[in-house]
Image (tube, rainbow, N blue to C red):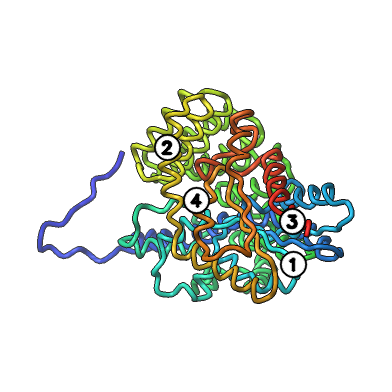
């Protein structure tokens, strides 16, 4: 039973905040800071996972002689053996047995073109490519919502995705519509982990500068659950991928298990252990129960979505559906519900349950008529279910929206071309699957020196023959998603076809 809140009459002064209330307010503030730490980890998690095997392959490619190609992009480019850059190297080697090729994959999940340009000079010095292929810009759809922020050049803004989101919210009057974001799990039942954060209140959220300090804290007090968690999470999700030749993930897991014994009801610890076992050890038997525990401890839409994805990738459709349906609860933020709808709709499409998928997507469209991903997902659904007239309408709507590149996208593509031209490096620009290449070509004045790689016609033909689920793992971008092995093979073949005339000379 909830106790009614006293509202003072007009003119009556509010009593000073009581000590218990002050402690609650402090706990809430520290909880928010704690959530920011995990939000940053969650937003970067995909990057650490992909780049582990990717960088190992890159180091081998850079060490080989031959014609060298560097690939730039986001999560649709990033990856190891199954990525399209890796498959491109294999395709070119088969087509041109007399030549030697090295393809270096510099794709990074969750980045935008500004991030890619920021690392360009360093990557060029490291790789020394003869050709650069860039498939980028999709994530710049988010940039438009915080363009105009006064300090985009500050180190904090450049490196922290959570900070970008925070600045976005402060400047929300400039937004055209709400930004779709992924929010990290929220902790609410472990006050003991919310207190000892003095060193981390400086706003940087940079655990790297406090690694030794955390070790010292743990040596002084082996029951310091907060320090055990922070250092364990850092070693599991960050350092083991960041420092070449250093794998601290096992030690990080041990610290997290110690934190779990001290704070068994902390959802952050459970969530991080779940991600460790699933992504690093590929142990679903241990990982899934931890994610289930995190969702039950903190039944947020974000936690249920994480759990639903994990079950989906393990082929456990019924449990995945149940978790995603929990994420659709009306009390969850709209952007979280939209993401869950896209995940769940894709599962229904894969199962050919088109009626359920349509009902969900139309519901999402009624909530947010301007969502590009929903329009693209509807186009995919109607194509897959044999309703081309309906598909064409949503595809046209999506195409007209996607053609409106942000200022950042236009500027960064042109800057990429300028830098490469100064170094005498050829540029190839690739359009995403099922997207019209014409707007991409229109970005450049006199584009005669650029190689354009199209993925629209071949993918459209292939999808009509075998379906979306044969070529895509999801529909994160609406009309396309992260590719399956077959999809990446098709991209690699399209790239090799576009390069044929140039390599033949």
Judge the density around disc 4: few (<14), some (14-19), many (≥20) Cα neighbours within 10 Å: some
Question: How many dots with numbers?
Answer: 4
Of 452 and 288, nearer the camera is 452
The numbered mark, 4 or 2, whose residue comes first in the sequence reads 4
Label 2 to label 3: alpha-carbon separation: 36 Å
Q: Which residue is mark 1?
A: 129
Q: From the image, state whether disc 4 or disc 3 is nearer to you.
A: 3
Label 4 to label 2: alpha-carbon separation: 25 Å
Residue 108 visible: no
Label 2 to label 1: alpha-carbon separation: 40 Å
Q: From the image, state whether disc 1 or disc 3 is nearer to you.
A: 1
Give x and y (percent) for residue 502.
Answer: 73, 58
Mark number displayed over residue 394: 2
The numbered mark, 2 or 3, whose residue comes first in the sequence reads 3
Circle 2 sits in a helix, a strand or a loop, which is it?
helix
Circle 1 sits in a helix, a strand or a loop, which is it?
loop
Label 1 to label 3: alpha-carbon separation: 17 Å
Circle 3 sits in a helix, a strand or a loop, which is it?
helix
Q: Which residue is mark 4?
A: 182
């Amino acid at each position: 039973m909830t106790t009614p809140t006293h509202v003072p009459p007009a003119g009556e002064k509010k009593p000073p905040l009581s000590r218990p209330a002050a402690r609650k307010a402090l706990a809430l503030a520290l909880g928010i800071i704690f959530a920011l730490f995990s939000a940053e980890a969650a937003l970067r998690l995909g990057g650490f996972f992909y780049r582990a095997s990717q960088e190992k392959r890159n180091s081998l490619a850079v060490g080989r002689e031959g014609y060298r190609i560097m690939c730039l992009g986001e999560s649709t480019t990033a990856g190891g053996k199954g990525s399209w850059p890796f498959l491109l190297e294999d395709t070119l080697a088969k087509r041109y047995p007399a030549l030697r090729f090295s393809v270096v994959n510099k794709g990074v999940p969750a980045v935008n073109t500004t991030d890619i340009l920021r690392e360009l000079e360093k990557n060029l010095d490291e790789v020394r490519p003869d050709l650069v292929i860039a498939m980028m810009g999709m994530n710049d759809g988010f940039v438009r919502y915080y363009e105009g922020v006064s300090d985009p050049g500050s180190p904090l803004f450049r490196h922290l995705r959570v900070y970008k989101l925070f600045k976005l919210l402060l400047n929300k009057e400039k937004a055209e519509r709400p930004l779709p974001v992924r929010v990290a799990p929220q902790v609410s039942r472990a006050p003991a982990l919310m207190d000892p954060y003095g060193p981390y209140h400086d706003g940087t959220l940079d655990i790297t500068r406090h690694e030794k300090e955390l070790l010292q804290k743990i040596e002084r007090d082996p029951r310091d659950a907060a320090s055990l968690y922070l250092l364990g999470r850092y070693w599991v999700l960050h350092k083991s991928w960041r420092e070449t030749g250093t794998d601290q993930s096992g030690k990080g897991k041990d610290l997290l298990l110690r934190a779990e014994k001290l704070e068994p009801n902390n959802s952050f610890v459970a969530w991080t252990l779940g991600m460790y076992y699933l992504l690093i050890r590929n142990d679903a038997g241990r990982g899934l129960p931890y994610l289930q525990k995190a969702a039950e401890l903190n039944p947020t839409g974000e936690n249920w979505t994480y759990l639903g994805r994990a079950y989906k990738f393990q082929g456990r459709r019924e449990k995945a559906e149940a978790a995603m349906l929990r994420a659709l609860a009306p009390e969850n933020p709209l952007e979280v519900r939209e993401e869950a709808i896209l995940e769940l709709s894709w599962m229904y499409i894969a199962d050919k349950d088109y009626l359920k998928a349509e009902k969900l997507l139309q519901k999402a469209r009624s909530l947010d008529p301007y969502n590009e991903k929903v329009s693209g997902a509807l186009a995919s659904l109607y194509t897959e279910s044999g309703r081309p007239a309906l598909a064409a309408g949503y595809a046209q709507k999506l195409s007209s929206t996607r053609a409106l590149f942000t200022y950042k996208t236009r500027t960064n593509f042109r800057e990429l071309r300028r830098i490469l031209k100064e170094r005498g490096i050829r540029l190839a620009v690739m359009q995403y699957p099922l997207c019209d290449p014409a707007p991409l070509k229109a970005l450049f004045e006199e584009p005669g020196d650029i190689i354009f790689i199209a993925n629209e016609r071949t993918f459209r033909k292939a999808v009509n023959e075998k379906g979306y689920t044969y070529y895509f793992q999801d529909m994160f971008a609406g009309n396309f998603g992260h590719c399956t092995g077959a999809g990446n093979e098709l991209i690699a073949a399209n790239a090799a076809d576009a390069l044929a005339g140039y390599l033949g000379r």
